Image (cartoon, grey):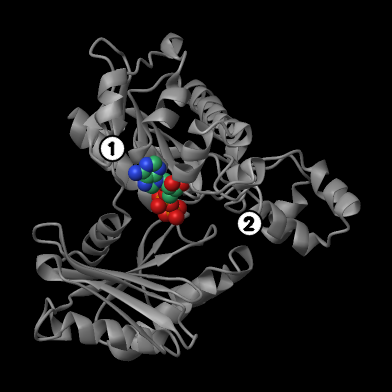
Amino acid sequence: MKVLVINTGSSSLKYQLMDMDNEISLAKGLCERIGFYDSVHKYYGKDNYYNKTTKNIKNHLEAIDDMLSYLVNEDYGVIGDINEIDAIGHRVVHGGEKFSKSVVIDNYVLDGIRDCIDLAPLHNPANIIGIEACLQEMPDTPMVAVFDTAFHQTIPMYAYIYAIPFELYEKHAIRKYGFHGTSHKYIANRTSEILKKPLDQINIVSCHLGNGASICAIKQGKSVETSMGFTPLSGLAMGTRSGTIDPALISYIMEKEHMTAEETTNYLNKESGVLGISGVSSDFRDLLKASSEGNERAKLAINVFAYRVKKYIAEYIGVMNGIDALVFTAGIGENNALVRRLITKEMEYMGIKLDVAKNEQAVGIEMNISKKEANVQILVIPTNEELEIARECKIVLNI
Ligand code: ADP
């Protein structure tokens, strides 16, 4: 059975065709700068085939068309006909309180995704465009929506309600939602497999540390707390996002820097985080290099990042009354041994004991990096959101 996984941004399309009999990727690709004269289509096919073309891709419909022509191409395609695609899984960023699990897409679901546009004005419209383009090109192929927020719908009310007047929740649905749910869910399932224990018998702290970063407390397989909130701006200090700050700072910054509300939000989303602190880069590879060359602000940014992660881990261990596994994933979590070492330093009291040598070896691979005698297993697990989406399709469609 073959599942096509689609992730559309406002000017991008990411896709991956999965063979779900063996859970392997057959081909994947990325269209960027859709709507621009110089759009780029990168395609990775069978036998390490790679192709990059620059051309004008006017809209998402054309991008989908282009993708399909690559997938069925005689020379480097991976299927003979688009009818070989049994299902399409769409990543949808926000499902609000309407969607607590993945669902088959029909008109009612599409309306529901539209109803959540207010909550994710940059993302949901792009996701809808992707779905509509696929509906046009492949009207008979079943489609499933997989929401970034759905996994966190098990968070209890006392954890998702902000301490502001309750009417704001009732009137505007203002509450914590959380994101990266597909990744945290994949991590939960994989951890259960690695530890050889049923999911409902283990507690996990999952640290998704990429450009966007979030931590999730997973108690017996269910998300009970997460660091992102109403939007993906809160929680950890990220590549360019501030994470949680004193809320009174917003009006203070507006006044002192003569900024509008929109400019301030942009400032906190795009010019803050480790980029803002270091003045060097949002990319940890650049920060590590600058820090090793003596740049004090780059060093400070790395320390701020690690310190915040450490605090969340401790908090979530408290929330769950202990954990079985602490997991690191995404770009930084999977590759950056120094950051993992800083985060886990002096956490022995909580059962966290890092094997420093194993930690250094764990770069982009799945590995247990805790000391043998430790109570808590520290795992590095490369995340696989596409596989998780394809699995959801299989489950929801029962195929
Ligand atoms: P996103 O998907 O949110 O854009 P990623 O999960 O790709 O982000 O993570 C990007 C981050 O991971 C960057 O800060 C990058 O420096 C870091 N990263 C990726 N590969 C490595 C590596 N080999 N060593 C250190 N950091 C890395």
Q: Position of residue 137 (x, y in %)?
A: 30, 89
Q: CA distance from mark 1 to mark 2?
A: 28 Å
Describe residue 142's horizontal placement relative to residue 336 as left or right.
Answer: left
Q: Position of residue 223 (x, y in %)?
A: 43, 40
82, above or below 191, in the image? below
Image mark for residue 363: 1
| Pointer 2 local density, CA inside 10 Å: few below 14, some 14–19, many at least 20 | some
* Nearer to the camera, 301 or 64: 301
Which residue is at 35% across, 33% downward?
327
362, above or below 68, in the image? above
Say whether residue 56 is visible: yes
Residue with the mark numbered 2 = 270
Image quadrant in which the C terminus is located: bottom left
N-terminal label among 1 and 2: 2
Query: Considering the numbered disc 2 on the image, is that residue within a helix, a strand or a loop?
Result: helix
* Nearer to the camera, 164 or 45: 45
Image quadrant in which the N terminus is located: bottom left
Identify residue type, mark 1: Val
Say whether residue 331 is visible: no
| Pointer 1 local density, CA inside 10 Å: few below 14, some 14–19, many at least 20 | some
Which residue is at 73% across, 60% downward?
171
Q: Is mark 1 within 8 Å of ligand 1?
A: yes
* Nearer to the camera, 167 or 71: 71
Identify residue type, mark 2: Lys
